[in-house]
Image: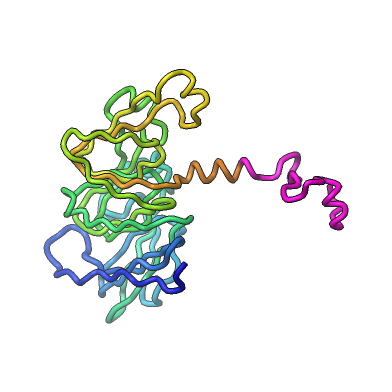
Amino acid sequence: MPSHVPHVPISRHTRSNSIADDVDFEIKGAEMQFVEVELDPGESAVAEAGTMMFKSSDITMNAVFGDGAGQQAGFMDKLLGAGKRLITGESLFTTVFTHEGAGKARVAFAAPYPGNILAFKLSDYGGRIICQKDSFLAAARGVQIGVHLQKKIMTGLFGGEGFIMQRLDGDGWAFVHVGGTLVEKELKPGEVLHVDTGCVAAMTADVDMDIERVGGIKSMIFGGEGVFFARLQGPGKVWLQSLPFSRLAGRVLAAAPQYGGKDKGEGSVLGGIGRMLDGDSSF
């Protein structure tokens, strides 16, 4: 593994009459990435609670209800926004980081587990990206985080992780975390791709998502891939992740100590006797 991972600088954009702040950023790291956002005076970034890595002292933090996109909205609008975030697995609150000093200031947001951070300029994708729930990391102020429900009943009932997804709307930068290795695919009109439902990280709004049965009864029971695939049909672009968090959590849970917190003696062919010989009498 190389000891030095090059930065990924993004060139400065001219401020326009867009809704979202037009921020600059760098994505750094390899397996455990973080995004460092540079703010001009008065600019803000909104992030999922608990993702901040560091910030300049001139940047203030303010916890807000919902996604922070409409801080001047009424209480009911804020409550509705917070409710949408709760459905998608996020916290009721987001944190708004605002540069209230002079010159440049930076704030960084870290990924929660190994994977990659995707940077989307939403205006390049028709103003909307659909992504896996709980994958949102941070965004420029003005990006709205909503709920995307699959319209087809069968997809809703059996779509698993792909049923309730996040919808990012706006024209600014948004940062999404995906687990493991990232694969980007451009689907042609009518082209169909079968994907494990948890491996669908993000897609453009024009991709049609449905479900398709894995195969025969034997494949469903013993195949280990569940009962249904996600069926993605182009045109559009999709981003796939090799390590969904649910898969990672399942493996960790399966390997966790059992029987009242005692470990199972992995690494020793003698099990409990081996632990006693090693000086561990706590079993």
User: Residue 98 location, x and y as percent?
Assistant: 32, 68
The quarter holding residue 115 reads: bottom left
Relative to 150, residue 200 above or below: below
Question: Quick check: 64 left or right of 254?
Answer: left
| Count of numbered labels shown in the rendering | 0
- Residue 75 appears in view: no
Q: Position of residue 260 (x, y in %)?
A: 75, 41
The residue most toward the left is 17
User: How was this image coloured?
Assistant: rainbow
Which secondary structure class fits the magenta region best?
A: loop
Q: Is residue 98 above or below residue 173?
A: below
Task: Tell me where residue 132 appears, x and y as whole percent.
Answer: 36, 43
Determine the image quadrant of residue 68: bottom left
Which residue shows up at 49% across the image and 28% down it?
223
Question: Quick check: 162 left or right of 168?
Answer: right
Residue drawn 45% across and 61% down? 31
Position of 260 with respect to 184 (left or right) is right
Q: Which residues are magenta?
A: 254-283
Tell whether position 129 is magenta: no
* Depth check, front residue: 88 or 2: 2
Residue ranking furthest to the bottom: 103
- Single out the residue that lies furthest toward the top: 217
**Closest to the observer: 46 or 30?**
30
Residue 237 shows in this picture: yes
Q: Is residue 281 magenta?
A: yes
Q: Residue at coordinates 38% horizontally, 43% vertically from top-left?
A: 133
Residue at 45 percent across and 67 percent down: it is 53
Q: Position of residue 170 (x, y in %)?
A: 21, 52
